[in-house]
Image: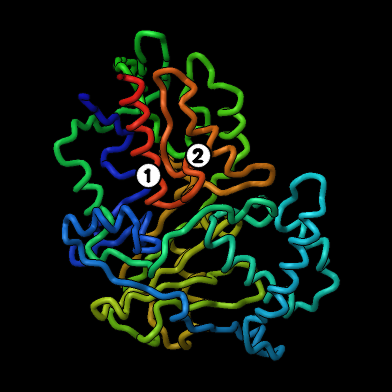
Amino acid sequence: MEVTLLEARNRIGGRIHTSTIWPDLPMDLGASWIHGVDGNPVTELAREIDAELVTTRYDSTRLHISRGLARTGVQDRGSDTAERLFADAMVWAEARQTDVSVQQAIDAVAPAASLDPARRAQLDFYLNATYEQEYSGSTRAMSAWTMDEGDTFEGEDALFPGGYGQIIDHLARGLAISLNSVVSRISTRPDGVRLTLAGGETVTADHVVVTVPLGVLKSGSIVFDPPLPPPKQRAIDQLGMGLLNKHWLRFDHIFWPRDYDWHEFLSEKKGHWAEWVSLAKVRDTPVLLAFSAADQAEAVEKLSDRDIIASIMESARQMFGSSAPDPVATQITRWRRDPFARGSYSFHATGSGPGDRRALARPDTGRLYFAGEATQHRYPGTVHGALISGREAAERVLQGAG
């Protein structure tokens, strides 16, 4: 079949975006890792192009505690207590007649007034580091019943020192691509599909595969004619579109411990610069990556770059010492404000689950098909899930054309 990619942006890749602002250091502003390298189809693509991979380990982590909590005697994550409370909360949630949010369940078994500030901070840290940073959604919105339903590949996680964009470039070879083509309407008829672009131009095709992010589908910026079947529209409405932003900080030298992949910051405020990645082990690179997720990310996006960096460095100086220098360069993402993403990746919001993803992927709209990480019920929220969903959609197109 002849295939044309209509790309709204002036670049390909979408939520895979390797920045070359620092020519000597490509930085991934979107997806960074192959999550589980064993048997992963992205690993196969990386091998096809001999892309360099560097593994990171979650057990290579150092915890830092804020000055305020340290003064109260906090010395660790309080993981045992937090995990026990979380387990009790999930038992409470399972007994409900309808789904509830993770936070509702937590508040039911551990009301705010029942915990001293230190214990509350440790519990919030556990919820943020384990669930919000992983799934991108707030515990206030995340389903207690289905939050972590899905499969994983075995093996370590791996970064691309040369950037994830290598995979995109590899896949795009020989493909007809039309950049700056913003689709505003998709009209499906028995004999074909007509796409209307934002500028009024039209494109016709025998079949269309829609791979825009869930956030774009939620926004309604694309009108479907006829309207999507109720199960599909319900899936779009019910699934959550989370937020995980990256804040890359480049320094003129490494002043933090070199032997850890991850650094964690336990503070009084939930999710306040809780998770960091160090590239010191990657070619001795003086770069730190600070994440913001869920509610914190929503708040941080509204700040200026200057205020964001000031906030990050206030935490960094508690973690690594008051003499820590300012970064010499930074790169900051705001995925919620991106009109062609409107968030980072999907999660199971209260009342939603894998069945909604199946409904979104189901070939029940004639010549119109859907793919993308939000449509993959086994591997949602991942690059490999998106890749698998695209291959499945392509098979459906070929079957429909046959």
Which residue: 38% across, 81% down?
325
Q: What is the quadrant of the N terminus in the image?
A: top left
Mark 2: amino acid: Gly
Residue of label 1:
388
Can residue 251 be seen here? The reply is no
Which residue: 41% across, 84% down?
324
Of 257 and 375, nearer the camera is 375
Residue 356 sits above or below residue 288 on the image: above
Which residue: 31% across, 80% down?
281
Quadrant of res 207: top left
Q: Give neighbour class at mark 2: few <14, some 14-19, many 20+ (Cα, 10 Å).
A: many
Q: Position of residue 241 (x, y in %)?
A: 54, 45
Is residue 104 found left or right of 270 in the rendered image?
Answer: right
Can residue 23 be seen here? The reply is yes
Residue of label 2:
215
Residue 233 sits above or below residue 115 on the image: above
